[in-house]
Image: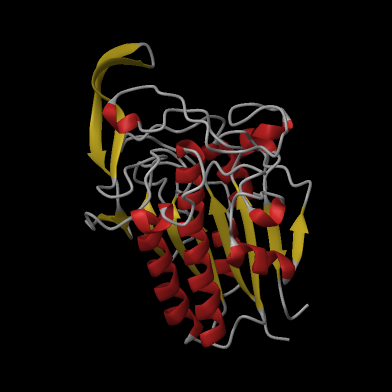
Amino acid sequence: MDRPNVVVIVSDDQGYGDLSCMGATDFRTPRLDALARSGVRFSSFYANSPVCSPSRASLLSGRYPGNAGVRNILMGYRTTPGLPANVPTLATALKQEGYQTGLVGKWHLGAAEGSRPNDHGFDESFGHLAGAFDYYSHLIWSAANREIVVNGKKGIGFLVHDLWENGQEVWHDGHYSTDLFGERAVQYIRRAAGREDPFFLYVGFNAPHHPMHAPEKYKERFPELPPDRRIMAAMVSAMDDQIGAMMDELERQGVRENTIVFFMSDNGPSRQSRNRLDGTLDPYYGGSTGKMKGHKFSLFDGGIRVPSMLSWPAQ
């Protein structure tokens, strides 16, 4: 058998109870449900951290977060270092074996030069470097226009644009990021599948991380849900559609059978502000841990036991 392609998909702040295939009765995620049926659904899968950056560092490096050099959530400053240069990643390992390597979506492992995706084995990258941004303007909010203290020093928070392609800043204002990332992932699959070498594609959706943004067409799918749960369902539904589009493209290119597809959330659901862009700290309660104790930031199961699945039809 030829070497398989590898697609790794990571959702953001999605709880154990935020997929219908994991037991949610108020969500409808048909494409992820189909992916689970085609392979293995992990009922006791644990992320290596209850927060974003360390969890992703562990996933990509195969190391505990501390050993990977990323112990905390990384800030969005463009000078923020992240994953050390000497830490190998899935991308560097597979590239050494002749794989094409691409990243689409959220990185959150360092925004400074030397810490970006193309510095860690990815031939191509498109997405945002920091943790959370506006789904339409692609701006990071960090205590905008308010005094903050960082590393013991007082300063003023900021709004900064955060969308990049191969290390160069790019603009796609008004394009809902979940749709944008899905479209770029499909384009990558189309290009890579036409070449001789196998490919590794890492897709980091920022959904359903705050700020809680979703187009009306997705919210209209869940009119019966209360507001917080409805926006979560809409954001996950949008991601489900885009994952489905990726699977359809793998089929069209004739490579789905020999493509390993792995999906996980980086940590449990958030209790952060529903929309930090307006400077408020109004807690959000849309995500579900599936009745487990804890949530994001917690080492109880609700913070680290996450939805996950793997599919490889050829095996």
> Quarter-wise, where is residue 143 in the image?
top left
Image position of 132 with respect to 202: above or below: above
Is residue 160 visible to us here? yes
Q: Residue at x 40, y 49 (%)?
A: 116
Q: Residue at x 61, y 47 (%)?
A: 18
Question: Looking at the picture, how far across and down is residue 14, in whole percent?
Answer: 57, 44
**With 83 as the anchor, is 293 left or right in this view?**
right
Of residue 192 and residue 243, the one placed in the foreground of this image is 243
Is residue 100 visible to us here? no
Question: Looking at the picture, how far across and down is residue 142, in whole percent?
Answer: 31, 28
Question: Looking at the picture, how far across and down is residue 122, in whole percent?
Answer: 46, 62
Colour theme:
secondary structure
Q: Residue at x 62, y 30 (%)?
A: 295
Image position of 246 with respect to 59: above or below: below
**With 113 as the anchor, is 191 left or right in this view?**
right
**With 18 as the anchor, is 203 left or right in this view?**
left
The N terminus sits in image quarter: bottom right
> Quarter-wise, where is residue 165 in the image?
bottom left
Q: Residue at x 77, y 63 (%)?
A: 40
